[in-house]
Amino acid sequence: MDKQWETRKNNIVAFMQHELYVPMKEKELAIMLQVEKEDREAFKQALEELCASHKIQVSKRGKYMLFDEKSTWGKSALLGTFISNASGFGCEEVDGQEEDIFIPREYTNTAFHLDTVEVAILPSKGGKRKEGQIVRVLERSSNAIVGIYQKSRHYGFVVPDNGKIANDIFIASEHSMGAVDGHKVVVELISYGSKSKNPEGKVVEILGHINDPGVDILSIVKGYDIPNEFPEKVLHQAARMPEEISEADREGRSDLRDVVMVTIDGEDAKDLDDAVSVSFENGLYHLGVHIADVTNYVQEGSALDREALKRGTSVYLVDRVIPMLPHRLSNGICSLNAGVDRLALSCLMTINDKGDVVDYKIEETVICVNKRMSYTSVKKILEDKDLEEMEKYQDLVPMFLQMQELSGILRKKRQKRGSIDFDFPESKIVLDEKGHPTEIKPYDRNVATKIIEDFMLMANETIAQHFYWLEMPFVYRCHENPDPEKIQKLASFIYNFGYSLKVNKEEVHPKEIQKLLGKVSDTPEEGLISRLALRSMKQAKYTVENTGHFGLACEYYCHFTSPIRRYPDLQIHRIIKDWIRGRMKRAKMEHYESFLESVASQSSKMERRAEEAERETNKLKKVEYMEDHIGETFEGVISGVTAWGLYVELPNTVEGLIHISKIPGDYYLYDERSYEMVGRDTGRRYKLGQTVKIVVVDTDKELRTIDFMIEENGEEV
């Protein structure tokens, strides 16, 4: 290595010595140090030599940092994520290991929830579970915490909303920003504390009083670090976007403006990113799935693109939508609004009466949607045979009937191969103008929603299979086979209800899960067994390697159909367009290969964050709704039996706990063999799927819990 690179090596070390340096991967370092592309190999060699000389070291996640003699990497320590508990202890999730490592409270070493930590395994005490001690914290997940401010005379404390943070945060009076008792605040940590000292922070934002409308949801948004506003640079870029497509944009595209097509969405949807068209000729269906060409407006590496990647997905909360892209794009030029020309990527499939795709084309197109339809309206036409609605859309009714036929064929084919359909009852929470829940009603999954679902699945499969066989860099949506141990537990559990699962060599075929769901359909235990089956599954994620989709029982799958609200879709649109235009040469492929893995990882992480935030806001509003019904009687189904009590789910999907002490008439014990609660003297049993009458006793918005008790004489209905 020449003298130039000896100097560069010194620069690398100096860069890592800076107090603001955080561990980075090779590519990130190269960008920060402005290493030219032709020098990347030499740069990599320099890193390897620095590691070999113990000047720097690399973590198991490929991140570089200064060498630390105290580090035990490569010996007995493990790198992972700390999962905290409200009681102070926690566990470490280690990549590639199925079992977590238990971390006693005295060995957490100031680690906070979701910090990246290095853990040394403690000598075995004879227990089944490994125990560890956090040697050091490598990366903090966040230094911002949301909570309720509690004021004392000369100082204050913030009680974190996140129950996984065990300690309150000390706030010196000069760092309070004038917060008063009951204010929801965002705190920036100054110190992470010690065994004898609370963490210390300063208030950086006051969200409002806990009783102010909207503050409850905003607290969850801030708590999950979901960006609620777009940076000024992003908004300026969005403001420069056109309101109509130009002649230059139309050039080189297939003109499909004469093809009859519709969008079918919910009544309140504004970001319409998919349109569909169907025709039938000579015994073959011609299905067109037309997706908004967002990449025409969001250029790779632009401020808009960087912000979209950072967000990963739009977040749909009970009272608001936090979009991935500014409304100027998502509701404007990118939205497939009826009656205006729009740019699209179209997957045009020819399908036979068995549901096989016998031919297809993937094209850049110009489209013009004929009608903006709602799920409700299409349901009225196809299910209810509503004469008024059929008259209103008489020109489109024949196409809707063909859509229904094709949807049925595609669904039947998926079911035949073993695709699993978890049809859980979902709910829509209706809020008044102050954000207070007034109604919880079931979400209607009807013929129209199924049509769109079936068509989008078909397009996603077709696109994924096409690019898999081209052996191009790509982002797939994968769902791995379930963990054998969880499947065995599920098999043991359902045996108590008289059901069985066929498992071969510790693996289960998705068809077996599908059969099980069919058997429990319309039984009292349907909801419970369906949920347990779902929990035995692994979580779907984005990957650059195609490993198939267990739940859909298919070999190839991706997300292509929602580029307005999902970053992976936006990313693969760029790949598709480069292929269509003949630009996918070796250099371009290497370009995508260099960052697609990080895109997949970031997108999966942001998807989980969005799902958790959505779940928490729904739980919060369900608790708030039940506050108005304390003392009232409802009929529900026992959805869970535990050592501490019975969980009961009401028809509106609200779930509450009957503590074991509130089961009347006897002293009850939990029978873990039969998953029942059994009266010691009477032998009275409460079991899963049993219908009971309950009284709403109490609610807790902070803990998001609802307490029930069995109504006197409210035994099985």
Image: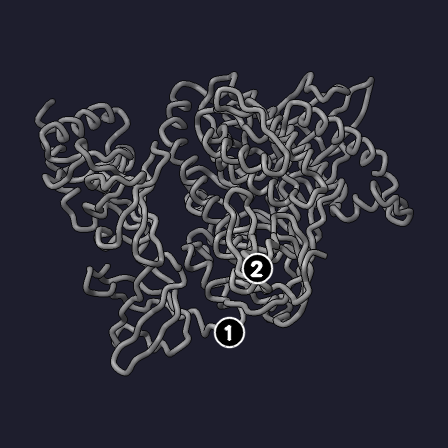
Tell which tag, 2 or 1, sits nearer the viewer.
Answer: 2
Residue at the far front: name it: 681
Q: Measured from the top left, where is residue 327 in percent x and y?
A: 56, 53
How much space separates mark 2 and mark 1, taking CA atoms? Answer: 26 Å
What residue is drawn where x is 57% and y is 33%? 560
Q: Measured from the top left, where is residue 627 in percent x and y?
A: 59, 70
Q: In this view, does 340 lie to the left or right of 550?
A: right
Location of residue 85 by image quarter: bottom left
Q: How crowded is mark 1: few (under 14 residues within 10 Å), some or many (20 or more)?
A: few
In-front residue for pair 475/224: 224
Q: Measured from the top left, where is residue 15 in percent x and y?
A: 16, 42
Q: Name the quarter where the N terminus is drawn.
A: top left
Residue 656, numbered circle? 2
Residue 212, numbered circle? 1
- Residue 391 appears in the rendering: yes
Q: Which amino acid does label 1 sit on?
A: Asp
What residue is drawn where x is 51% and y is 22%? 579
Helix, strand or loop under label 1: loop
Please say if 104 is above or below 14.
Answer: below
Please say if 88 is above or below 276.
Answer: below
What residue is drawn where x is 23% and y is 45%? 138
